[in-house]
Image (cartoon, grey):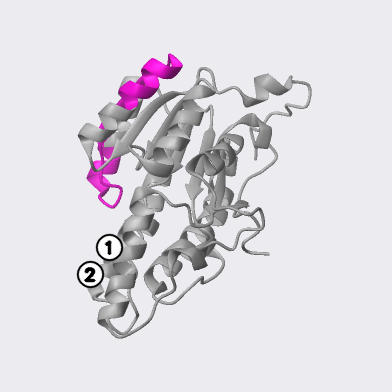
Amino acid sequence: MSFPFADVSERPLLDLLSLRGRRAVVTGGAQGLGKAIAARLAEAGADLLILDLNEDAARAAAAELAERHRVRAFGTRADVADTASVVAAADYGVAELGGIDIWVNNAGIFPNAPVTVMPDEMWDAVFAVNARGVFLGSREAAKRMSADGTGGVIVNIISTAGVQVAFPGMAAYVGSKHAALGMTKSLAMDLAPLGIRVLGVAPSFVPTEGNIAAAKAGAAAAAAAGIEMPPLEVMNKSMIGRMGTPDDIARVVLFAASDLSMIMTGSTLMADAGETI
């Protein structure tokens, strides 16, 4: 069995970092962490497709990055939990970009509630986006990456919740992120013969708009149930004296997506400022 991964030892550093000529898809890419990831990929030269539930925001982000970094960039609506939507988005990426070389499964939701009051609908929604969404995105990306035999890279945005539990009320989120971490390993094994590497990036809590809103909503639900939740500050277990920023995580994703990480597949990089030590 052939494993088509090149030895890049003789290539210069800037060449290994460059994504010029590659086509990247970022789910949940219209704001926050996803937009920061898309921006760094574009800066490295990748053409982009930004997927988001908010189509107007996806198109606006794509237009901004296209102008800033002089790359081709498109935005469209996609629901990562819906098969037909993901298939259509992947086909759109091939049609507009000419193919797919990098797929970042970034879209995720972060509702929290004590397990005794967590409704079925919350559990199902979290797994639909955070686990099923990773599976669907990876499957459709792999089909298109392997169609021309050139391979590619899939990067799954996991979380430190994939290896630990930071505070109460996280049963659905922690379960879904453990699933995503496990899938990263299994997908790497399945896809290596196709020349596709699969890596995870596990950030600690990054104060984006969505994360802050979700954390506050979870605290409110807990308070209504008479359960005290820790303040946001407790989430900061950083060894570097500050919380991470979206760009801190985006730079790790750029490393994973580039040929700098050619030797790596199946691993999850802990972008956590030492939180999980």
Residues in magenta?
Answer: 62-88
Against 12, is 87 above or below? Answer: below
In the foreground, 193 or 56: 56
Residue 154 spot, x, y in % from top left: 50, 41
79 falls in the magenta region:
yes
Q: Can you give x and y, in whole percent of width and height, for residue 252 in the image?
A: 59, 41
Q: Which mark is residue 121?
A: 2
**Where 71 sits versus 186, above or below?**
above
Element type where label 2 sits in the image: helix
At x 60%, y 31%, the residue is: 258
Badge number at residue 24: none
Q: Which image quarter is the C terminus in?
A: bottom right
Is residue 126 found left or right of 161 in the rendered image?
left
Q: Point out the residue furthest to the top here.
A: 70
Which residue in the structure is indicated by mark 1?
125
- In contact (CB < 8 Å): disc 2 and disc 1: yes
Report helix, strand or loop for mark 1.
helix
From where the camera sits, is residue 129 visible? yes
Q: Identify the residue at horizontal 32%, vertical 29% (top origin).
A: 61
Front position in the image: 25 or 229: 229
Q: Which residue shows up at 45% across the image and 29% down it?
A: 39
Q: Residues within 10 Å of mark 2 (few under 14, many from 20)?
A: few
Q: How many neighbours does mark 1 have within 10 angstroms: few (below 14), some (14-19), or many (20 or more)?
A: some
Q: Amino acid at mark 1?
A: Ala
Residue 39 or 126: which is nearer the viewer?
Answer: 39
Please provide percent x and percent y for residue 134. Answer: 41, 51
Above or below — where is 37 with respect to 113? above
